[in-house]
Amino acid sequence: MIDRGQHPIEPWRLRETRLAMDKLAQSESLFALSNGHIGLRGNLDEGEPYAIPGTYLNSFYEQRPLPYAEAGYGYPESGQTLVDVTNGKLIRLLVDDSPFDIRYGYLTKHERSLDFRTGMLERHVDWTSPGGKRIKVRSRRMVSLTQRAVAAIEYIVEPVDQPARFVIQSELVANEAQPKLSDDPRVAAVLDNPLKPVSHDGGEHGTVLIHRTTRSQQLMAAAMSHEVDTSVRYAIDQDVREDWARTTVICQLQPGESLRVVKYLAYGWSSLRSETAVRDQVAAALASARFSGWDGLTKQQVEFLDDFWDGADIEVQGHPELQQAARFALFHVLQAGARAERRAIPSKGLTGAGYDGHTFWDTEGFVLPVLTYTMPGAAADALRWRHSTLGMAKQRAEELGFKGAAFPWRTIRGQECSGYWPAGTAAFHINADIAEAVMRYYRATADEDFLDEVGLELLVETARLWMSLGHHDRDGRWHLPGVTGPDEYSAVADDNVFTNLMAARNLRSAAEIALKLPLRARALGVGSEEEAAWRDAAAAVYVPYDKDLGVHPQSEGFTGYALWDFEGYKDKYPLLLHAPYFQLYRTQVVKQADLMLATYWCGDAFTAEEKARNFDYYERLTVRDSSLSACVQAVMAAEVGHLDLAYDYAYEAALIDMRNLHHNTGDGLHMASLGGAWSALVAGFGGLRERDGFLCFDPALPMGLSGLSFTVRWRDARLKVEIDPVAVKYTVHDGADARVTLKHAGEEITVTTDKPVIRTLEKRRPLLPRPPQPLGREPRSAMAINEEA
């Protein structure tokens, strides 16, 4: 174990050994619990002190107007903001007549830990009240991964050296006061009392508060119930009002005696069902939680996570901090998607309301690859959610004068929630990102029913948008003018290479699956002429190339722009907060990997030499003002042979939140970067790609890592890949007949349960020297493991 101040490095948990008041917001995000439906920020049990209170229900939002100084045709008129719903985490404590508040009295010990194997947040406190009463408090908190609507808290108090009277006040509180947030556009809008009371009820089986939003007219219910366990006499009382409910437990304890309260919580919401139906839903969830009991809920949680880690774990040998970070990343990605069940996976998961709780292309591009290969059912559900919004995407395309579907740049429910912004409105590549996620899931699972139910229609309608956006020139080349690629510092450009290549993949996939499912395709109105047009456009797609420099311009003419003044802005990052977008749009500066992402996702469109030259060129321009960049640069650095640089980028992607590298972790975790950390390790050093229906690997390790092992799910098998500096071993489990045919460095091999395969690794050498980065934007060294955060 290596000490990292208040966060020791341990392989299977994140632990905080002292409470840092100046880092409350960050710790609340790090210790957040979720199952994809319910999200609880890691606020203290007693509620105060806090930085940002947060209890969230996936896709439960309020509408707000989007103001414009000057409106324009097709500008979205309203946005959606995630609501901080009724807080059920609160358990206040009085010791005699002193409120338990760590800001008063004397705090001997305060420790919290998040265990990735149990899904449990544990807290241990040793505190002496201003009145001189020393007590110990232990709590465990969970959001159930098996009972979607349920969360639970176990709270235990005991006096240490003298008797004391304890009063526990367990509460539900709606419309908590929200802190004033910064002017950073990446944080959330503040809603004033978004929940309007509908009804409230209390009884021996639990308490329920029901509220409704004013504009979005969504109905939600929160319920709580308690079990009390103590050997002494106690009294219990209940009080229920419109915006809060309280259950009070009182007892007198001697040293050696304890009071244990288990609090069960249930949450539900709907925009369609009645008040009675929503109330009954949470009442049933509460009854189910009580039936399971605390021990039953924790047992179910461990069994769920045991199965997940068996098919998803990453073992990093030689860098304990990266090992911890990799599991932290996987755990939070799992929490974001495990029980989302046909609702969006927001860019912050349910760990905070940053970006208003919106979903972007991050989900399909960075989170779904992880879920596809580790928990494919969750990936399928996320894509089914996209399909459920298809009608709105088609309506948006029509508003913009196009055919097919135009999926929103940012949304909660499916409507476009981004005010007009060139770097978002014109970022049509999200269509191709969704199509690619559909094909990735299908190839990994061979799920034919998914294709028939939702996959083909998503491919068809996204393909139709590209045909509406693009055109053939007089020489027959197919162009996509006036679009924005992944790099948001280059907007409304012609023939963005990433967008063009991904659109072509989208078109080919639509034609391929339409041919595979002809009856379904005909039902969607796809004829042979349309299929042929898709293939023709894909074959003729124009890919700009600068022959003088020997690199691909990010978009047509990009390499002819003036260079950005990196010297003048060396201390002014992120640039979006210090420079006008107009200046960024017309110079060679890259916010996040764009052309590099094209070489990763569309690798078969580039030669090895082109990849090396492109990497060398764009490394010097990319400032990584986006959390989506480091992971992509890690993958491509590894592929072109800069393994040490790939190591640094993988470290940055994985540690983005644990070390608060972008200084905004307090607003919620960066799910795309956490998902990207998996890609940096598995696709970077493991060389994972999917080509021609095969799972392909080309592993290589950097100096500093003595080994890397990971498991992925492919069809009906779990494939384990174990890499050391000289060899790789492939093994399969999941039944006696499990087998995977894959490609190792181009060689086709078959791995079965009783026949693992070992191959020697070829040493990877870069074609070009390691390139520099923009001034002041070099990645933190992964080798400097003793450097303090």
Image (cartoon, grey):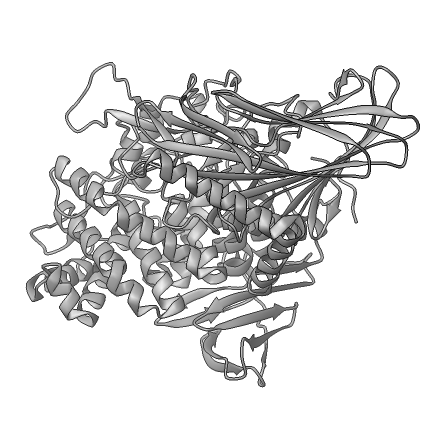
Image vertical order of residue 502 relative to residue 752, above or below: above
Between 267 and 379, which is closer to the camera in this rendering? 267
**Residue at point 58%, 70% (across, down):** 721
Q: Where residue 259 appears, x then y in whole percent?
A: 77, 35
| Quarter occupied by residue 399 | top left
Q: Where residue 463 appears, x then y in whole percent?
A: 19, 54
Q: Is residue 401 left or right of residue 564?
A: left
**Residue at point 76%, 30% (across, down):** 234
| Quarter occupied by residue 67 | top left
Between 767 and 111, which is closer to the camera in this rendering? 111
Q: How many callouts does the rendering have?
A: 0
- Residue 547 visible within the image: no
- Residue 685 visible within the image: yes
Q: Where residue 296 appears, x then y in whole percent?
A: 63, 54
Q: Where residue 172 appears, x then y in whole percent?
A: 55, 27
**Residue at point 54%, 64% (across, down):** 686
Image vertical order of residue 419 relative to residue 657, above or below: above
Q: Report the residue that reaches farthest toward the right.
A: 161
Q: Is residue 111 left or right of residue 638?
A: right
Quadrant the C terminus occupies: top right
**Residue at point 58%, 56% (across, down):** 643
Between 334 and 286, which is closer to the camera in this rendering? 286
Between 711 and 165, which is closer to the camera in this rendering? 165
